[in-house]
Amino acid sequence: MSKKYHIYGMGNALVDMEVLVSDEFLNKHQIEKGLMTLVDESKQNSLMSAIEDIETTMQCGGSAANTIIAASQLGAKCFYSCKVSNDELGQFYISDLQGNTVSSNLTTTNLQDGITGKCLVMVTKDAERTMNTFLGISSNYSLNDIDETALKNSEYLYIEGYLITGENSKKAMLHAKDIAKKNGVKVAMTFSDPSMVKYFGEGLKEVIGDGVDLLFCNEEEALTYTNSKNLNEAIDSLKSIAKQFVITRG
């Protein structure tokens, strides 16, 4: 019996604001290039103010959201579980998901007051992206934001590694994985960013538990997570926690 959704994604809902910057700008403001750094809203606003002649491309984002939207554009039927607030950016986020034919747990009438998460994506000429993220209401993502009916009716659960930064969101990751395993839903996960593996490695190991069906990571994340000296060693280690895995390089 076919299921309603190919992929049920869960992750932070962030409105991406993409800008072009120089390496000098990153150095001047002591921003670690190539990583995602969590910041408060005032820090994010001060960076926005410091960028001259800013031309911002704004779109519905967040690690898992980007994956879910891309899958939808390729023809998959997708559901995205996330949290936005009852503000202008929250309404924009819902509209953008709907425009990309992605179903979600969000409605225009069930939103709480607060600030929708925002991600300042700073792109340098070498195409490296550096992200300063203000999670906003996404930091309150919890079990209550999981649509169990949609999850059970999906072929894959796709978990975003960034959720590991919050205790309630980590509980949601564990709960969703448990529901998936009990209902024959395959589990896919992404480490999302080297900083997640570096600073929240133990939490990721707790979520992975006895393993996942599909794991996405880059070379740096693979080496750090497995404490390996080279890629071949990391590959051997990952075989024990993932039935299949993809390691991006460069």
Image: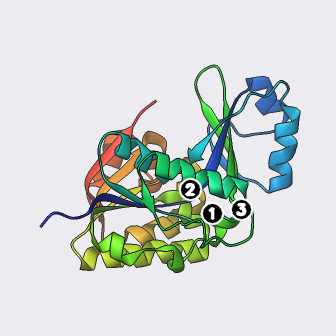
Contact between marks 1 and 2 (CB within 8 A): the answer is yes
Contact between marks 3 and 1 (CB within 8 A): the answer is no
Image location (x, y in percent) of residue 188:
33, 58
Q: Alpha-carbon distance for marks 3 and 2?
A: 16 Å
Q: Earlier in the sequence, mark 3 or mark 1?
A: 1
Residue 122 in sight in this render: yes
Q: Element type at marker 3? A: helix
Q: Alpha-carbon distance for marks 1 and 2?
A: 8 Å
Q: Residue at x 51, y 68 (%)?
A: 202
Foreground pick, 245 / 124? 124
Q: Alpha-carbon distance for marks 3 and 1?
A: 8 Å
The kind of residue tagged 2 is Ile
For mark 2, what is the residue?
A: 94
Q: Is residue 211 left or right of residue 173?
A: left
> Which numbered circle lies on residue 210?
none
Residue 223 in sight in this render: no
Q: Earlier in the sequence, mark 1 or mark 2?
A: 1
For mark 3, what is the residue?
A: 136
Asked which quadrant contains residue 18, the reply is: top right
Q: Residues within 10 Å of mark 3 (few under 14, many from 20)?
A: many
Q: Residues within 10 Å of mark 1 (few under 14, many from 20)?
A: many
Residue farthest to the top?
Answer: 125
Q: Residue at x 38, y 49 (%)?
A: 216
Image location (x, y in percent) of residue 193:
54, 49
Q: Residue at x 51, y 69 (%)?
A: 203
Q: Is residue 170 above or below residue 238?
A: below
Q: Is residue 61 left or right of residue 157?
A: right
Residue farthest to the front?
Answer: 109
Q: Residues within 10 Å of mark 2 (few under 14, many from 20)?
A: many
Image location (x, y in percent) of residue 7:
32, 57
Foreground pick, 223 / 120? 120
